[in-house]
Image (cartoon, rainbow, N blue to C red):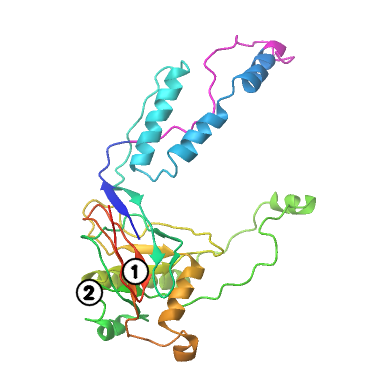
């Protein structure tokens, strides 16, 4: 797994949402009794002969890509937007600061592979605002079934330098139906109806959520303090689709936490089963033996390079 990660302190601002702007002005229309045929014709000609929509979209989506707030991507995309709008003749095009927001973050390089018993690429992505590592790391992996603070003691001293899996194996249902669905006329009518009155938030549910969040923060601190190499987590969705959210705090003075990697559900399941075969622990026991999953990472607090493997060693190269 190869990866570089950088944090950035806040300096700017927002990116103008940019699709198309016309650099020429049409005469003011004072008579609204009939459409201005000349103006409509000019709009149609601009769209059919001089459209820059695809070029703008290509730059924003393909060249600059995802634009996490306060990241280099959004800074460069904002510069492109300002330059492009100025080239079209718009006046007073500029960026505006806002905030405070906190640190920016970027992932420059990431690559993950299982290297033994069979080599295959992992579908995985680092979570935003997670730390880098100090140099390459080769490590084993461990399933740590930690559901309450009292279980920290069992794993104390067992996790240093290990890749840790905490989440249980989840069932991935087969997909027989098409993921997309065209709404019927009646479904569209139903969607247009106002929502019924919502019940007030369930106090018990909110309390459970608060306790889960508090425990999650304590778990991350425990894994970090124990020196775990990284936390591997099953990503939402399946079939190769991953939703990756933040994994740490963007606050400037927030303590660093260990790297957190969102792994495709199928890939996570394969790693989990190799560590905990169903005929051995049924996916529910608490194995603490390290079967090999290795990783190589390079970096400091700002960058990370990583390779992942099973029962083997990992190597990295610049």
Estimate how packed mark 2 is, as few (under 14), some (14 to 19) or many (20 or more) residues with alpha carbons within 10 Å.
some
Residue at (72% x, 13% y) in the render: 37
Indicate whether 275 appears above or below 76: below
Marks 1/2: CA distance? 12 Å
Instruction: Tell me the quarter of the picture where residue 165 sits.
Output: bottom left
The tag on residue 63 is none
* 82 or 297, nearer to the observer: 297
* 82 or 174, nearer to the observer: 174
* 207 or 274, nearer to the observer: 274
Visible residue check, residue 57? yes
* 233 or 201, nearer to the observer: 233
Nearest to N terminus: mark 1 or mark 2:
2
Decide whether residue 25 is among the magenta residues: yes
The tag on residue 226 is 2
Estimate the x, y position of residue 233 in percent, counting from the top left.
41, 68
Estimate the x, y position of residue 173 in percent, counting from the top left.
61, 72
**Residue highlighted by disc 1:** 231
Query: For numbered disc 1, what is the local secondary structure?
Result: strand
Q: Is residue 76 left or right of residue 21?
A: left
Query: For numbered disc 2, what is the local secondary structure?
Result: loop
Estimate how packed mark 1 is, as few (under 14), some (14 to 19) or many (20 or more) residues with alpha carbons within 10 Å.
many
Give the magenta range.
13-38
Instruction: Tell me the quarter of the picture where residue 197 sits.
Output: bottom right
């Amino acid at each position: 797994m190869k990866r570089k990660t950088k944090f950035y302190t806040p300096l700017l601002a927002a990116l103008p949402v940019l699709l198309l702007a016309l650099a020429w002005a049409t005469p003011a229309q004072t008579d609204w009794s009939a459409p201005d045929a000349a103006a409509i014709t000019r709009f149609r000609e601009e769209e059919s002969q001089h459209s820059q929509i695809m070029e703008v979209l290509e730059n924003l989506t393909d060249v600059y890509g995802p634009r996490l707030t306060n990241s280099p991507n959004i800074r460069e995309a904002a510069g492109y937007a300002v330059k492009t709008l100025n080239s079209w003749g718009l006046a007073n095009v500029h960026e505006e600061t806002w905030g405070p927001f906190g640190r920016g973050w970027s992932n420059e390089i990431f690559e993950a592979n299982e290297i033994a018993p069979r080599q295959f690429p992992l579908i995985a992505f680092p979570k935003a605002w997670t730390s880098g590592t100090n140099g390459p790391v080769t490590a084993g992996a461990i399933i740590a079934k930690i559901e309450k603070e009292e279980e920290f003691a069992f794993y104390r001293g067992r996790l240093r330098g290990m890749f840790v899996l905490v989440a249980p194996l989840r069932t991935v249902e087969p997909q027989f139906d098409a993921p997309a669905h065209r709404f019927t006329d009646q479904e569209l009518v139903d969607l247009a109806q106002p929502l019924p009155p919502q019940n007030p938030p369930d106090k018990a549910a909110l309390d459970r959520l608060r306790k889960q969040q508090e425990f999650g923060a304590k778990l991350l601190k425990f894994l970090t303090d124990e020196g775990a190499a990284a936390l591997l987590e099953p990503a939402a969705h399946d079939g190769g689709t991953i939703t990756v959210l933040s994994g740490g705090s963007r606050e400037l003075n927030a303590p660093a936490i260990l790297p957190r990697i969102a792994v495709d559900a199928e890939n996570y399941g394969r790693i989990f089963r190799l560590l905990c075969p169903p005929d051995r622990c049924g996916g529910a026991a608490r194995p603490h033996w390290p079967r090999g999953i290795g990783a190589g990472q390079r970096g400091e607090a700002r960058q990370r390079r990583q390779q992942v493997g099973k029962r083997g060693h990992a190597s990295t190269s610049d």
